[in-house]
Amino acid sequence: MSKKIVAVTACAAGIAHTYMAAEAIEQAAKEKGFDVKVETNGSIGAENVLTTEDIANADLVLVAADIKINPIRFSGKPLYVTDSNAAIADGAGLIDTALKDAKVFGEKGSKVGNIQIGNDHSKVNFFTHIMSGISYMIPMVIAAGLILAIANVYAFQRDDMGRIVKWGFDNKTAMGALMANLFQVGQVGFKLMIPLFAGFVANSIADKPAIAPAMIGAYLANDPTSLHTKAGGGFIAALIVAFIVGYFVKLLKKIKWPHIIQPIVPIMIIPVIATLFISLIVFYLIGEPIATLMSGLYAWLTWLNTNSTSAPVIIGIVLGGMMGFDLGGPINKTALIFGTAVFADTMAKYGPTHANFLPQTATQAAISVAPLGVWLASIIWKNKFSKDEKVATTAALGMGLVGVTEGAIPFVAADPIRMIIANVSGSAVAGGLVALTGCKFYGGIGSPLGSFIGYIQQPIPLITWILCVCAGIAVTALIIGLTRSPQVMAAAKEAV
Amino acid sequence: MDTTIFNQDHILLDTASTTQAEAFQAIADLAASLGYVSDAKAYAAGLKDREAGATTGFKDGFAIPHSNDASILKPGLFLVKFSHPIEWAALDNQPVTVAFALTIPKDGGKEHLKLLSQIARKLMNAEFRTTIQNETDGAALTTAVNQIQ
């Protein structure tokens, strides 16, 4: 019985070499009296496609391609992989070599992880890894964020005059207890979203073995208790962790492990080594700077606050900008804690007439600018956002309206530098303007809706606050819309 | 053969080029003068880029330089015969005397792209290569290429 050969050919342009290689293999195989079928993966689509039966009956599978061909359907068959020119140069010689040197694909221990045949450099870059992580993170941001937002509305307790003066759940009522629970649900989501993001960014770089170390590393980097700091590292720390883990695991995969342990390399050896490695980095390299940064910032803010009584706008701008910098990360938390602490402190000491409202008012004015800014940008510049991103901006609108900054995180993670500039600028504008106009934020929601849900003393009732916050939102939206990078837009469209 | 892809005007007997870069420029000028590319320089650069990926020179003095860069307006085939054999780093190490150059538009119609791929297949036919190599008359060359379906 004559031998049966099946082959797949492909090239970059998908017009010339794909077909020349196919022709060469067909001619050579026929001369040798073999049965042959060649699938061409050209730019007009795959033709003469190999069926499962073709592959099952084949004695040899040849891949002559200059681009990536997924080999998974050839599992268990003798497979020989080369480029298109090898077939064009000498079809008969290639078949002889392949018959001699083909290796059964997918045999236990033959390769680690997901194999790529040929090279496809064009598609993978920094942004595609981040976008992959974000596409897994978005559902959690939305689920957790919206539940948190609903609960947040119920967290404002009114006094006899109907003014909202206190934030916190009234656990004595059934509704209050339920909302306190829902608030917890949202917070768990926000806590999990950081490691989830890091895990899938690392997965995009180095596949499955990288997920566990990146998730554990990012959790630690975002957990103040583990770090013995006041706040965790947020998504910026997660991004750093994900890339360190991704490339470290990639390196580990290149090691020629002894045959006997190869089956356990991806499920045990690499995850254990990489987890140990990243944990030590988080504890001894990343954690310390976050703690130092936090206390340094806090000290600086205190100094600024006591020295800027003549120019309150400065502290308004600084605190507002900090809120937009890392959206719930250490710098944002430092500003928020500082604002609340100064308010609570001076309120207790001097009473409402002489309390220092400024830091809290600025941070609250800035809190909704980033999520609402990105939403506004997606409304004005419709073409610059993918479908999935528009769903996320709608969710950001919901979160932003009730003062949940985290709604903007997916966009910042995708394009940190431009987005941070946009968010910081807009947040600083909002913080500076409320300081300039002398608004006093007693309590409530830190969004334009704060004028209605909450109690804010302001020069022109309702209007001043809304205008200040909206000016910040407009600045952020404008910068996002005008600077959005084509690379990020392309990556966002890919990552569906 | 579809005459919008190839006709006798698409044949060039290049007596001047002595290097691959000059050959690319000659091919690009021809394609541009016939309205197949918007920018001869860009197309020549596209040919060079493709060549950097892997050689398009294959057997018996034949090469199939091609590009799918943005300057390309419509699908076309250009047959250029060189008086001076040109060093091309071909698979058989022979210098190139015949180039079948292709313009591949990014969003070309299926039928036209298919025709271009048929030309590529035909080039693997030794008999066809001998005919093209030995023939110098434009009309006879056109007839030979037109046999490709």
Image (tube, coloured by chain):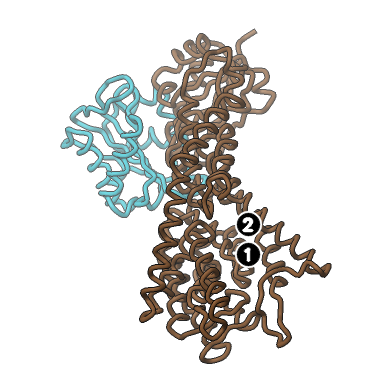
Chain colours: A brown, B cyan
Residue B28: give x, y in percent of width and height: 27, 45
Residue A189: give x, y in percent of width and height: 66, 54
Label 2: chain? A
Q: Which residue is mark 2?
A: A141
For the residues labelled 1 and 2, say whether their Cβ atoms are less than 8 Å apart.
yes
Residue A249: give x, y in percent of width and height: 50, 31
Label 2 SS? helix
On the question of residue A19 being in view, the answer is no
Q: Which residue is mark 1?
A: A395
Residue A54: give x, y in percent of width and height: 66, 23
The residue depicted at 38 percent of the width and 35 percent of the height is B143
The residue depicted at 65 percent of the width and 59 percent of the height is A142
The residue depicted at 57 percent of the width and 22 percent of the height is A265
Q: Front-most of A164 and A255?
A: A164
**How packed is label 1: few (under 14 Cα within 10 Å), some, or many (20 or more)?**
many
**How packed is label 2: few (under 14 Cα within 10 Å), some, or many (20 or more)?**
many
Of circles 1 and 2, which is in front?
2
Establish if A62 lies above or below B118. Answer: above
Label 1: chain? A
Q: Front-most of B44 and B52?
A: B52
Total label count?
Answer: 2
Which quarter shows the N terminus of chain A? top right
Establish if B146 lies above or below B36. Answer: above
* Callout 2 amino acid: Val
Point out the residue furthest to the bottom here: A460
